[in-house]
Image: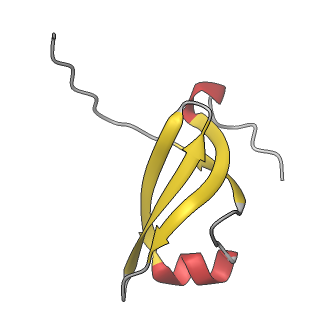
């Protein structure tokens, strides 16, 4: 699968490190070269996509608001 319509800065390739399954939503930790990216997706999507620890994935980030604080 080729993902070209998304800015490359918003894509993080990695492997699933952990999945915390819930009845409706699941939390997925993806280990990337830049660090861990965590996503919350429907548990149904986890099952339909066959996601499991060790699966190679691309985390696509869409941020509509980013806040910064000076340290």
Colouring scheme, one of rainbow, by chain, secondary structure, one colour: secondary structure
Q: Tell me where residue 17 sits by quadrant.
A: bottom right
Give the answer, above or below, for where 33 lies relative to 37: above
**Residue at the outermost bottom position:** 23
In percent of width and height, residue 27 lies at 41, 66
| Residue at 67% from the left image edge and 75% from the top image edge | 49
Give the answer, above or below, for where 57 lies relative to 63: below
Q: In this view, does 39 lie to the left or right of 60?
A: left
Give the answer, above or below, for where 60 lies relative to 56: above
| Residue at 60% from the left image edge and 40% from the top image edge | 32
Q: Tell me where residue 46 sits by quadrant.
A: bottom right
Q: Tell me where residue 13 sits by quadrant.
A: top right
Q: In which quarter of the image is the C terminus?
A: top left
Q: Is residue 68 left or right of residue 8?
A: left
| Residue at 57% from the left image edge and 47% from the top image edge | 31
Q: In this view, does 57 lie to the left or right of 19?
A: right
- Observer-nearest residue: 48 or 18? 18
| Residue at 61% from the left image edge and 83% from the top image edge | 47
Picture mark count: 0
């Amino acid at each position: 699968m080729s993902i070209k319509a998304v800015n490359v800065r918003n894509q993080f390739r990695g492997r699933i490190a952990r999945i915390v399954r819930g009845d409706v939503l699941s939390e997925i930790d993806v280990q990337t070269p830049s660090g861990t990216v965590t996503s919350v997706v429907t548990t149904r999507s986890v099952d339909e996509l066959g996601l499991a620890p060790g699966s190679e994935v691309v985390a696509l980030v869409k941020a509509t608001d980013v806040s910064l604080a000076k340290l």
